[in-house]
């Protein structure tokens, strides 16, 4: 009976020691922690109220989104594919095919 009691104490001591050693080794073997990027400092705003319709174009001049007001007064937001949209001679925008639309 005394022999089993000594094994329990030895097992407890060895498991505590193994935990401490494993914790110390983990600091050296662990990968670097990943942190979130700092938020962008760019502020997007308008100097005046927007006149609808509003078209968002990318660097190549392709229309990628539009914000319009429907005839019943409901806002409508549309996303378009990235194919370049060409402007006609009179300055109107030829909008590419619709990908997604949201309406309130």
Image: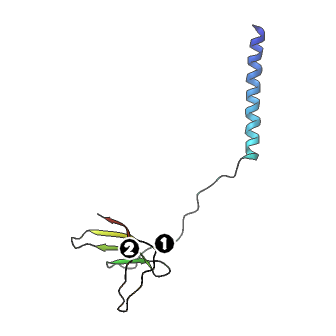
| Quarter placement of the C terminus | bottom left
Up-down relation of residue 42 to residue 88 (above or below): above
Q: Depth check: give the residue in front, 11 or 90.
A: 90
Q: CA distance from mark 1 to mark 2?
A: 30 Å
Residue at figure coordinates x 54%, y 69% from the top left? 41
Q: Depth check: give the residue in front, 43 or 77.
A: 77
| Quarter placement of the N terminus | top right
Task: State the SS at label 1.
Answer: loop
Q: Is residue 104 left or right of residue 34?
A: left
Q: Residues within 10 Å of mark 2 (few under 14, many from 20)?
A: some
Residue 18: percent from the left, percent from the top?
76, 31
Q: Earlier in the sequence, mark 1 or mark 2?
A: 1
Q: Is residue 99 visible?
A: yes
Residue at figure coordinates x 34%, y 73% from the top left? 67
Name the residue tied to disc 2: 97
Q: Is residue 28 left or right of residue 98?
A: right
Residue 68: percent from the left, percent from the top?
31, 74
Quarter of the view holding residue 17: top right
Name the residue tied to disc 1: 43
Residue 71: percent from the left, percent from the top?
22, 73
Q: Depth check: give the residue in front, 98 or 14.
A: 98
Residue 15: percent from the left, percent from the top?
73, 27
The count of marks equals 2
> Which numbered mark, 1 or 2, is in the foreground of this view?
2
The tag on residue 34 is none
Q: Is residue 49 visible?
A: no
Task: State the SS at label 2.
Answer: loop
């Amino acid at each position: 009976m005394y022999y089993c009691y000594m094994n329990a104490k030895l097992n407890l001591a060895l498991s505590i020691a193994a935990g401490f050693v494993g914790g110390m080794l983990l600091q050296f073997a662990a990968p670097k922690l990943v942190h979130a990027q700092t938020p962008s400092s760019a502020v997007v705003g308008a100097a005046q109220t927007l006149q609808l319709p509003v078209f968002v174009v990318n660097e190549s001049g392709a229309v990628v989104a539009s914000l319009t007001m429907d005839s019943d007064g409901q806002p409508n937001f549309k996303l378009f594919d990235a194919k370049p949209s060409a402007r006609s001679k009179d300055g109107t925008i030829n909008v590419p095919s619709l990908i997604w639309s949201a309406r309130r």
